[in-house]
């Protein structure tokens, strides 16, 4: 097997964020003369040969896409599917993965990361979180509507060699040795905002109403903070942070609202469901999370 095949990144989950990272890594590969990343779709077959990216200034570029169809071993993999597809994705790709393959997991919520590490202790897992504003206009066109950042890390560990070679100079990428703290904060934010936007059928900003919606938001924050503090991830001023995020993203519909509206399964089970599971482990009550989860069950696939 050629060395450059092992050096090559593969991206499973050619959704909006997967294509955005593919386009960034591909242009870096072109500039520095290394192997471009390969995309992987659900059936391990060839997808579109090109896709388009519209950037913030309205400029549109076409990016050539090459696909992994089982032609070699994979040593570097980014999984940018929905949280509930990650385990199935690793299972399907296992025959192609090298024994100590590096795998970056980039999805909303928590719980799956820990499950993957337990199932496959020999793989090198890295966790990531992104605030890039990007959406798919059609199957082969993405719109990069808001500049964000991506943090990647492994708890308490320094960045591996591939980080400085391939990611460190990409715009908006940052290594984080406290990635678990960051992901727990993100879960606390998402488990307050996301389910309520479905229950109240509203944009993020409408939750800050000084009334009943905000009271629910506040109760969710208090319960999450008590659970997360007990689990070793205390967050000071969680409620203020959540209010700030809801206001700053006020005109957005949360990712879970968009999933629900498009009849897709949401990732709420890895948000509020994760908080509930932690609470159970420590014997703590979460009455508001429980009420929210059971109301959602009547309305959405969570
Ligand atoms: O991450 C988000 C999501 O929608 O999943 C927030 C922060 C709530 C922004 O919409």
Image (cartoon, rainbow, N blue to C red):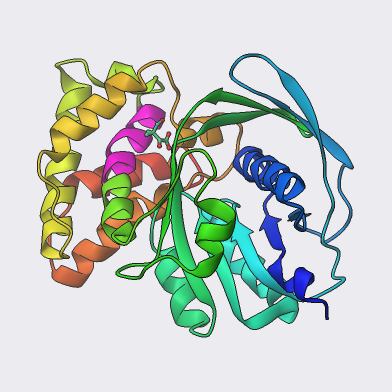
Question: In the image shown, does 161 or 147 lie closer to the viewer?
Answer: 161
In the image, is residue 248 above or below residue 179? Answer: above
Find residue 35 and report its image quarter: bottom right
Displayed-image quarter of ligand 1: top left
- Classify residue 158 as left or right of residue 247: right
Residue 218 position, x and y percent, is 15, 33
Residue 231 position, x and y percent, is 17, 65
Q: In which quarter of the image is the N terminus?
A: bottom right
Instruction: Say which residue appears at 41% left-offset and 53% top-offset.
Output: 269
In the image, is residue 202 above or below residue 4? Answer: above
The rendered magenta stretch, by its main secondary structure, is classed as helix
Residue 39 position, x and y percent, is 76, 53
**Is residue 40 something that shows in the picture?**
no
Does the stretch in magenta take in 157?
Answer: no
Farthest residue to the front: give it.
Answer: 32
Instruction: Say which residue appears at 18% left-offset and 59% top-offset.
Output: 233
Find residue 226 and report its image quarter: bottom left
Chain part drawn in magenta: 188-199
- Classify residue 175 as left or right of residue 14: left
Residue 51 position, x and y percent, is 80, 34
- Classify residue 218 as left or right of residue 172: left
Does the stretch in magenta take in 197?
Answer: yes
**Is residue 109 something that shows in the picture?**
yes
Find residue 5 and report its image quarter: bottom right
* Total numbered circles: 0
Question: In the image shown, does 50 or 173 lie closer to the viewer?
Answer: 173
């Amino acid at each position: 097997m050629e060395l450059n095949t092992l050096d090559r990144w593969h991206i499973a989950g050619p959704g909006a964020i997967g294509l955005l990272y593919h386009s960034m890594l591909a242009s870096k590969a072109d500039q520095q003369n290394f192997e471009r990343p390969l995309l992987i779709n659900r059936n391990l077959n060839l997808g579109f040969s090109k896709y388009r990216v519209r950037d913030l200034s309205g400029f549109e570029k076409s990016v050539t896409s090459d696909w992994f169809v089982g032609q070699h071993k994979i040593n570097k993999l980014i999984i940018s599917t929905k949280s509930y597809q990650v385990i199935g994705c690793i299972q399907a790709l296992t025959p192609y993965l090298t024994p100590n393959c590096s795998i970056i997991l980039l999805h909303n919520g928590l719980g799956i990361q820990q499950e993957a590490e337990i199932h496959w202790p020999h793989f090198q897992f890295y966790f990531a979180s992104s605030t890039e504003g990007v959406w798919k206009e059609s199957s082969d066109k993405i719109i990069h509507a808001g500049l964000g950042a991506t943090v990647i890390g492994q708890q308490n560990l320094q960045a591996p060699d591939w980080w400085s070679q391939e990611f460190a100079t990409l715009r908006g990428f940052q290594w984080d040795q406290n990635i678990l703290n960051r992901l727990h904060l993100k879960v606390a934010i998402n488990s307050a905002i996301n389910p309520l936007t479905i229950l109240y059928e509203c944009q993020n900003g409408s939750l800050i109403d000084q009334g009943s919606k905000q009271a629910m938001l506040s109760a969710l924050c208090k319960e999450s903070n008590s659970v997360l503090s007990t689990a070793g991830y205390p967050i000071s001023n969680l409620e203020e942070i959540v209010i700030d995020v809801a206001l700053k993203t006020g005109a957005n519909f949360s990712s879970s609202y968009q999933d629900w509206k498009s009849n897709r399964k949401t990732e709420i089970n890895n948000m509020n469901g994760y908080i509930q599971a932690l609470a159970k482990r420590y014997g703590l009550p979460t009455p508001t999370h429980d009420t929210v989860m059971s109301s959602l069950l009547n309305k959405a696939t969570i």
